[in-house]
Amino acid sequence: MNKKFLIVLVGATLAVAQTVYAPKGKPAQYTAPHKPHTKLSDLMAKHKGQKSWRELIVNDKHLKSEYIYAQPGFQHPKALHPDTREWWVILEGEVRFDLETVEPFTAKKGAMVQVPMQTFFSYEVVNGPALIFETNVAGAKTIYAERKDAPPMPGYDWAPVQMNRAKGQWLRDNKPVVYYDEIARKIESKELRGTIRVVEDDRGAANFIYGYNSKLPPLDEKNRGHYHPEGAEYWLILSGQIRYPIENVGVVIAERGDVVYVPANTFHAPRWWGDGPSCRLAMNGFPQIAHLYDPH
């Protein structure tokens, strides 16, 4: 077999690019609630006049993400997830978080917040309405500190139990909160380079991908990019515009607050777009998801 090798840096690990033969299934098989492009402007129009709302955006076999719009005083009671890490992006407003082992803090617009498994957390919207993008592993369960806070859950009863737990295991350079502006500044000053991992767990990851269209090579319309053989990938646009040619879908231009979703087996080629800096938060169920590139 003819082999071509290319040394690339993935995180802190050297990876070798090699020609191989991979299965390629049918592309762009979308099932509800998933769609190629969810526009934030459409969601805001859909829920116009509602003081609070929640919209499911992703719920596949790996991850679940929802948009939450809430007024001051909205609270998530003290709870924990037994086996999963949850994370939030604050698109608008301010949210007061209380995470076990960390001093309480107010997360403002541009904050990316997370809590590890088996760690109590609560939060409250303060000082005006907030728009929050919430993500956890598919099928994640919530355990409440108080029975009165546990909501009805079809097919389940709420049982008092004892739990041995290892609270506050951040690990892998995960941090309670990081800010868009802080990471962008470090990339601009060359303190940080490339893709920045802001969330990493065994069953979920979020990567901060920041840059400029003007600094890329000329657009190659024939380049299909890559696909993922075992899972979907999706992106929350944090700033600017991102261009996505998606196999069997066409070209999508997404803006801040939009979500783009690409199923497994589907070629796509994300590219920073427009004038000025652009940034996407890439999410998938594998910390080191395989990228299978178009060899054209």
Image (tube, rainbow, N blue to C red):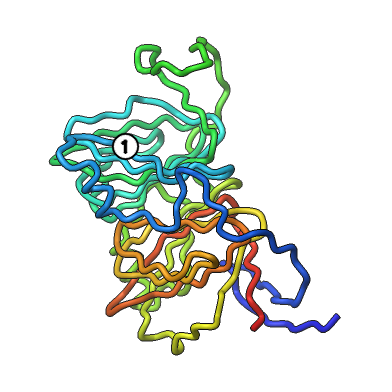
Residue 252 occupies quadrant: bottom left
Name the spot of residue 63 as percent of width and height, x first: 52, 44
Instruction: Name the residue rendered at 58%, 63% in the picture.
Output: 266
Judging by the rendered image, the residue that carries numbered circle 1 is 54
Q: Residue at the location (37% across, 36% down)? A: 99
Is residue 153 left or right of 55 when viewed as pictured?
Answer: right
Q: Amino acid at mark 1?
A: Arg
Residue 60 in the figure: left or right of residue 275: right
**Image position of 117 with respect to 17: above or below:** above
Q: Position of residue 14 (x, y in %)?
A: 66, 72
Q: 10 Å neighbourhood of mark 1: few (<14), some, or many (≥20)?
A: some
**Residue drawn 45% across and 41% down?**
86
Dot 1: what SS? strand
Would residue 54 be found to the left or right of residue 223 on screen? left
- Depth check: give the residue in front, 104 or 112: 112
User: In the image as oriented, which residue stretches furthest toward the right?
Assistant: 1
Q: Vertically, is 141 above or below 276? A: above
Q: Nearer the viewer, residue 203 or 242?
A: 242
Q: Who is closer to the viewer here, 206 or 29?
A: 29
* Quadrant location of the C terminus in the rendered image: bottom right
What is the number of callouts on the image? 1
Answer with the quarter of the image where residue 15 lies.
bottom right
Which part of the image, by quadrant, shows the N terminus? bottom right
